[in-house]
Image (cartoon, coloured by chain):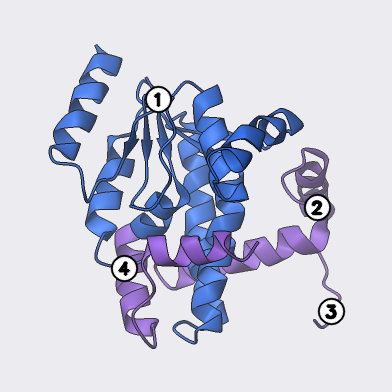
Chain colours: A purple, B blue
Amino acid sequence: MTTISISLEDELIEWLDQLIKSGVVKNRSEAIRGGIFSYIREKLGIHSREELWEYLKKKQKAPLQNGVEAIRSVREEE
Amino acid sequence: MPIYLDTNVFYNAYYPIEDTISADWILKQLSPDFTGITSEWTIAEMFRGLKKQVNLKRLENPDAQVAIDLFLSEIGEFAQKKKIILIPVKMVNIMSSRPLILNNNLYAADAIHAVTAIQEKVNAFITFDKDFKRFSEIPVLNPKKELNFRDFIIDLKDKAES
């Protein structure tokens, strides 16, 4: 992970700190990372499950495991 | 009259696989009077389930992040609209999982989901996993295996909303 410095308005920093205080995110970096993922998703035009299915169908390199297979393997990792 | 939703219901609803339409239909039935209950642990399992697809080289990490972002955004919205209630994993759940693990031989995560469902007094435990071990307190229903699954859900929903 690379560290970068960014400039933000005081108001934005207050909002970030409120998110941390209310326990939604752990720190400012986590909040900004989450915001960037949301921004990318918005820019890709993915606002619904249907749009996500279409996107993933195009982007997947092989069919995804089904939910039972994927989640069962997660639970059996223990 | 809530129903419990196992993690595979969310996974199937968000990612394009053969059971997607069926899982999506379940999420579309939820309302403030007919809530879906799930453990907060579901969120961690969703993260890991998708990371597995990255590890299996079926998906790139940035695409997995985008998919997770929509899931998190919608689950937050569902919770805000009181269609879904996320139940925290507390010590009381962990202690209650003991007989399910020791007597019924459930995996730890399965037991946490089962105990959460029992404590929340749900009417049904919905899972696509045919191997999910049954427990006596709540009917375990598989949308793929149960005949009249949709009728059962619509009936429950009608009762809850009337």
Q: Position of residue A67 (x, y in %)?
A: 39, 61
- Element at label 4: loop
- Element at label 1: loop
Residue that sits furthest to the top in the current view:
B162
Q: Earlier in the sequence, mark 2 or mark 3?
A: 3
- Element at label 2: loop
- Element at label 3: loop
> Residue tagged by mark 3?
A4
Mark 1 residue type? Pro
Q: What label does residue A26 carry, if any? A: 2
> Residue tagged by mark 1?
B2
Q: Quadrant of residue B113?
A: top right
- The quarter in which the N terminus of chain B is drawn is top left
Bin the neighbour count of mark 3 within 10 Å (Cα to Cα): few under 14, some 14-19, many 20 and up.
few
Bin the neighbour count of mark 2 within 10 Å (Cα to Cα): few under 14, some 14-19, many 20 and up.
few
> Residue tagged by mark 4?
B16
Q: Earlier in the sequence, mark 1 or mark 4?
A: 1
Q: Position of residue B78 (x, y in %)?
A: 46, 38
Q: Position of residue B55 (x, y in %)?
A: 56, 82
